Image (spheres, rainbow, N blue to C red):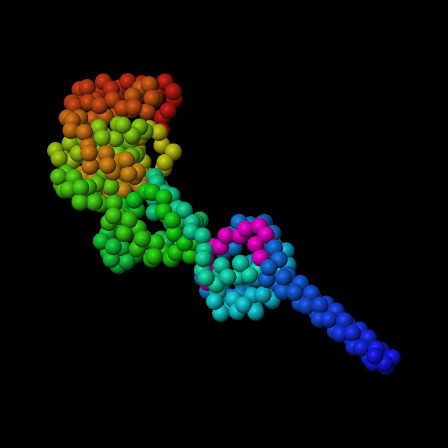
Amino acid sequence: MTTETAKSTKNGAKIALIVFLILVAFGGFYGLKLYKLYFAPNITGNEKYLYIKTGAQLDDVVQEIKNKSLLKDESSFTEAAAKMELALHLKPGRYRLKKGMNNRSLINTIKSGNQEPVKIKFQNIRKKENFAAYLSKSLEADSVSFLKVLDSAALVEKYGFTTDNIYTMFIPNTYEMYWNTTPIEFFDRMQKEFTKFWTPARKQKAAALNLTPQQVIVLASIVDGEAIYDKEMPIIAGLYLNRLNRGILLQADPTVIFANDDFTVKRVTNALLRVDSKYNTYKYAGLPPGPIMMPSINAIDAVLNREKNNYIYMCAKEDFSGYHAFAENKAQHEINANKYRAALNKRNIFR
């Protein structure tokens, strides 16, 4: 090999090495960039969820991320979102954020709409407005949106209810649904749950009592309002059914408290009894037009499986145990009631 050939070969090798090193450098640079862009851990863990509202644009999402400092590197997310066309596939919802999650995983989760459902548990909520406010804490829609459905005669009629008894449609339980479930979607779901709950066996028991499912729940709300202990519920249900069947005013204190809209009352006085409301069962015969609270399933089943007794009267026991003294006649009831009044007076409880 000549000297020139050797030099040429050596120079070629140097050039090749330089080119190789340049390619490696460029490859390393772009590889690192791609890693930071898509695969580097980027979730801070400051919040458990990212909420994307219905109708939100990508800019809104980026602003939410900035406001709550959800990402370590916001610019890399913005760039990755642009390259992965997140703006064209943005889906509202509640998305779980895991510490160390990368941009690619988060963007794909949002694009697929793979949100984590919320669990909603409700029972013993007294009024429709309370229920609407409660739902708005767990779902995207505000309380006004839920109340509009609850108070819309045309809409609730679609479900087979009235604005007075629509509250009976909600069977207390724990339900899973998506955060961005709309009020209409929520009510559709609840109507299906109501239908599922009212099995042929339960319907048959209601019919045997000459009550509709809605009336059973209204009565159950009174039973639940009276009973502190579940084991007393069938007894109380039997008592009120005796009154209904005999045409006697229910005279249920919880209905009077509801009618006066004062739930701090511990002693129902004559002043409270004068309130003119269909929920005042001291004035108006039969069941009130709607429930006074959202009764438990135990209370509903207590009505359907009421104890067959001859009780007409009841009052709280004077020992404040939470139990009741039951009576079949007025004379015995007056004895029980006087004991309880004396106990209230002794404790200076006058309202």
User: Residue 20: horizontal and vertical position, in percent?
Assistant: 73, 71
Would you say 140 lies left or right of 156 here?
A: right
Quarter-wise, where is residue 267 in the image? top left
Which SS type dominates the magenta stretch?
A: loop
Q: Residue at x 78, y 74 (%)?
A: 13
Is residue 253 positioned above or below 294 on the image? Answer: above
Please give the name of the residue rendered at 22% of the width and 20% of the height, measured from the top-left corner. 334
- Report if residue 301 lies within the magenta region: no
Whether residue 328 is visible, yes or no, is yes
Q: Nearer the viewer, residue 258 or 50?
A: 50
Q: In this rendering, would 322 be left or right of 234?
A: right
Residue 93 painted magenta: yes
User: Residue 160, position in %: x, y?
Assistant: 22, 53
Viewport quadrant of the C terminus? top left
Magenta extent: 91-102
x, y percent for residue 292: 29, 40
Quadrant the N terminus occupies: bottom right
Horizontal side of 4 relative to 18 (left or right) equals right
> Which of the pair 2/314 is nearer the observer?
2
